[in-house]
Amino acid sequence: MKFSLEIREGLDGFVFHVKQSRNPNHIFLTTAASLVGLYLFWHIPQPRITQVLVACIILLLFGRDVLSKWRGADVELCVTNLDLISTGRSPSDYRPSNISRADIYNLQYREAQHGGAEFPDLPEGLYVEYNQGMPWDASACVLPHVGRKQTEDIIQKIVGRFPDTGKLASRPSKPSQLTSLNLNVPTDR
């Protein structure tokens, strides 16, 4: 799918703006699949209330996907001295975020990952790994739908303007794999 990347530099930082147009082929295929499913299910002999309930569920699930694809992507990443603020919408499982630049310890490109049944599909683009005060790694997609080359250029611009990005925070230490039973702690008597 086609996308456009716009980069603006201001006094306090950068603004990266990604727009991705709608995908008419995906919209057509999703609509056709939902209509075929509704037609086939409607002609199976079952109680009318079951048919109406399942038809509503099918329309809701496919309708949400079609509406999301129809709107396309429009995401803006604002990088300032203090924060990385990502706002907008995307048909993938992108979520807007506001991350302190002091908490970031890695900027990287990631390819799209299909999550399957339990996990969401993650878009390709610029990801930030940051310290959130928890024992596990936190990462967020702050600029989806940009390719490897564009992401590397964006990272170079950010690090060129703010050279301490990724150096202020440290990666959280891995917790011990041993289970403590607290046998060395005296009991109160």
Image: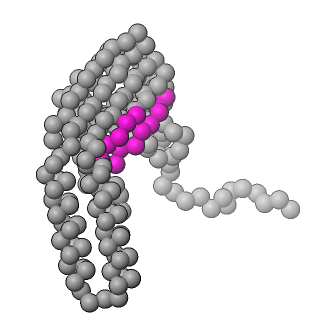
**Picture residue at 35% right of the left edge, 22% below the top:** 15
Towards the viewer: 57 or 181: 57
- 128 above or below 92? above
Q: Residue furthest top?
A: 11
The residue under the point 48% across, 41% down is 173
Image: 62 above or below 77: below
Based on the picture, tell me whether residue 154 belongs to the magenta stretch.
Answer: no
Over which residues does the magenta segment extend? 87-100
Which residue is farthest front?
48
Above-or-below relation of 64 to 102: below
Quadrant into which the C terminus falls: bottom right
| Colouring used for the render | one colour
Residue 5 appears in the picture as rendered: yes
Q: Which quarter of the rendering shows the N terminus? A: top left
Q: Position of residue 108 (x, y in %)?
A: 30, 34
Residue drawn at point x = 48 percent, y = 55 percent: 177
Residue 60, how many percent across, how many down? 35, 63
Observer-nearest residue: 172 or 31?
Answer: 31
